[in-house]
Amino acid sequence: MKRLADKVAIITGGARGIGLATATLFAAEGAHVVIWDINEALGYAVVRNLIDEGGSASFQLVNTTQMEKVLLAALHVRDTYGHIDILINNAGITRDASLLKMSPSHWHQVIDVNLTGVFHCTQSVASYMVEQGFGRIISASSVVGIDGNYGQTNYVASKAGVIGMTKVWAKELGPKGITVNAIAPGFIATDMIGSIPEKVIQSVMARTPLGRFGSPEDVANAYLFLASDEASFINGAVLRVDGGISL
Ligand code: NAD
């Protein structure tokens, strides 16, 4: 039996990176995957591949910072499938600069996507989950949302905020049959970290007991676990997926 058989799973930022690995794994585990992303070309290409491989998948052009778009997209998913079981709040961006150099625009861009976008998607989908008395909501935080990081005031604020919202929603939605959890990846080999200088890469490797960056699949496996029936008593947790870098 596939672990997500017939579950409807919305994955934000599913067009590439960790979201793509998650869409691929969830489709292989029997879920109807719905990708919400701003990258239309990549999003449709991913969906075509998933369908070619025998999965069930669709794409909606959704900028998670726009509440109206998110509401309409959620309504469409519910009308198409009749239920929404899983929301993976995975879309995220970085605009790094040290405190004294951070522009207001870079502050707002990151907060809009990483924090407000997660609020929009969760609020839109949670109403359907409450009606059906079941749901799994998992959001991408980061180890830096727990530990802080040089040059990431905006990103760290957003990822710490995701942890706070996760705990609130775990309390509010738990009694309605919905679990809400977060994952906190360490350094994962995706385009997002492509601009990191070689010196920093070496230092990260040296500080990680497992001696490597994580793969998108490492994180997808954590999302899958928290979305699966095996995690039915886990609520309000923050699961580090970081090779031990924080130890
Ligand atoms: P990525 O940049 O490779 O992919 C992000 C995806 O999100 C892209 O497809 C992009 O188009 C989409 N996206 C961006 N803004 C959007 C918006 N407003 N609406 C809809 N989609 C949008 O990133 P990734 O490395 O795969 O990271 C995925 C998540 O994991 C992010 O939330 C990130 O903060 C988090 N994370 C990543 C790392 C890492 O090392 N890569 C570490 C910790 C946490």
Image (cartoon, rainbow, N blue to C red):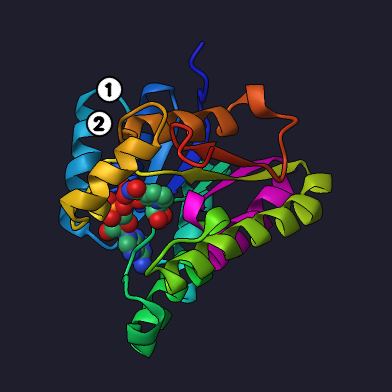
Q: Please state which of residues 116 and 135 is positioned toward the viewer in this rendering.
A: 116
Q: Please state which of residues 66 and 168 is positioned toward the viewer in this rendering.
A: 168
Inspect the image, locate mark 1, and give the three-letter code of the amino acid beneath it.
Gly
Callout 1 touching callout 2 (CB < 8 Å)? yes
Q: Please state which of residues 223 and 81 is positioned toward the viewer in this rendering.
A: 223
**Circle 1: element type:** loop
Q: Is residue 2 above or below residue 80?
A: above
Magenta-drawn stretch contains 158: no
Can you tell which quarter of the image residue 34 is in? Answer: top left
Residue 51 circle label:
2
**Residue visible at 24% across and 46% down?**
201
Q: Is residue 51 above or below residue 148?
A: above
Inspect the image, locate mark 2, and give the three-letter code of the amino acid beneath it.
Ile
Residue 121, percent from left and from top: 52, 61
Residue located farthest toward the top when viewing the structure as drawn = 1
Can you tell which quarter of the image residue 153 is in? Answer: bottom left
Magenta region, main secondary structure: helix
Residue 88, percent from left and from top: 49, 47
**Residue visible at 42% across and 35% down?**
219
**Residue visible at 49% across and 32% down?**
222
Residue 54 circle label:
1
Residue 14 circle label:
none
Q: Is residue 60 visible?
A: no
Residue 202, percent from left and from top: 24, 42
Q: Is residue 25 above or below residue 99?
A: above
Q: Please state which of residues 104 and 36 is positioned toward the viewer in this rendering.
A: 104
**Circle 2: element type:** helix
Highlighted range, magenta: 118-144
CA gap, disc 1 to disc 2? Answer: 5 Å
